[in-house]
Amino acid sequence: MKKMRNLLGLALAAGAALSLTAPAFASDYSFATTAPQDYYGSTSYEDVYGSQYNYGGRNAVDYKVPELEYGRMSTTQTGIMERTILPGLQGAVVSDSGSYGIGGGGGGPLTELVIDGTGGSGPVTTTPVIQQPGYTSVSGMAYKDGSIGTVKIPKLGISVKVWEGETTASMAKGLGHYSSTSGWLGNVGVCGHNRGARYNIGAIKDLKPGDIITYTTVYGTRTYQVTMVKTIANNDWSYLQGTVDNRITLTTCLANQPAKRICVQAVEKSA
């Protein structure tokens, strides 16, 4: 019996010794770690900018610029946003020296750079004059026959009445007036057939700078001098924008080139 107790004691002692050296299971421990400093998971940043945040480098947010108002364009140089007024969409700014500048619609001073005759230069502050594009509604301009005016081009022997609307019906009777343009002041836009119709103005492609065009309405007769004869795309409407000066713009199709148009502009002749 004593021998058995001795064997049992030795077995217990051995078990205790083994328990001191046996490895523990991982579940017996709790690990607490922190994410690496350069880690940035998918968050609202990625949802907004479409990419993860880039530590130490450029990010999408760095290239984000404010939206521009309608009628303005921008050029970006060294991160500075420059705003320029698009021609025809805003009033022109004319300084008292007669030169043109950029204005935002306010009446504050305009600083411009003037080059003098000696080669020197310096900043000059002037008070700008804001001039809005001219515009006259066609309301009240119709004659008894419904036309709103008559265009004459002496060099080409053309004398054609103008009817409201850039439509087939208008051009069947003469010239169609672009309804989005002025009827008298500013830029008057008209269009007509180039061939195959009783009233056509296809010959305007042969006009030269300096040639005369007249436009007669209930307001009187205005005389213009041709300044431009140009082939443009059929979807180029830039020449119909409002202008500060008085001018007339004529467009017609170009034979066998449906994607092109002939555009003639003439500016009011000074007295």
Image: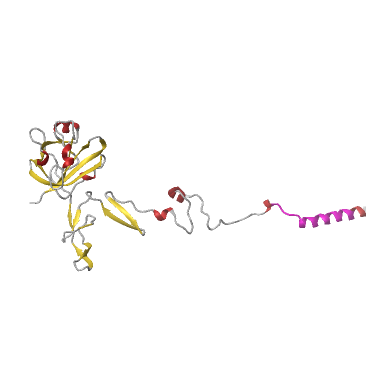
Q: How is the image coloured?
A: secondary structure
Q: Which quadrant would residue 152 be assigned to in this image?
A: top left
Say if the magenta span includes residue 14. yes
Picture coordinates of residue 214, whole percent (x, y):
10, 43
Q: Which quadrant would residue 159 be assigned to in this image?
A: top left
- Is residue 38 at least partly visible in the picture? yes
Q: Which is more toward the observer, 129 or 115?
A: 115
Vertical placement of 15 versus 237: above or below?
below
- Is residue 189 at least partly visible in the picture? no
The segment highlighted magenta reads 5-25
Say if the magenta span includes residue 187. no
Q: Which is more toward the observer, 56 or 178?
A: 178
Picture coordinates of residue 232, whole percent (x, y):
24, 42
Picture coordinates of residue 25, whole percent (x, y):
70, 52
Is 28 left or right of 228, judged from the image as shown? right
Is 143 left or right of 92, judged from the image as shown? left
Q: Which is more toward the observer, 122 or 201?
A: 201
Is 116 left or right of 214, judged from the image as shown? right
Picture coordinates of residue 38, whole percent (x, y):
52, 57
Q: Main secondary structure of the magenta part?
A: helix
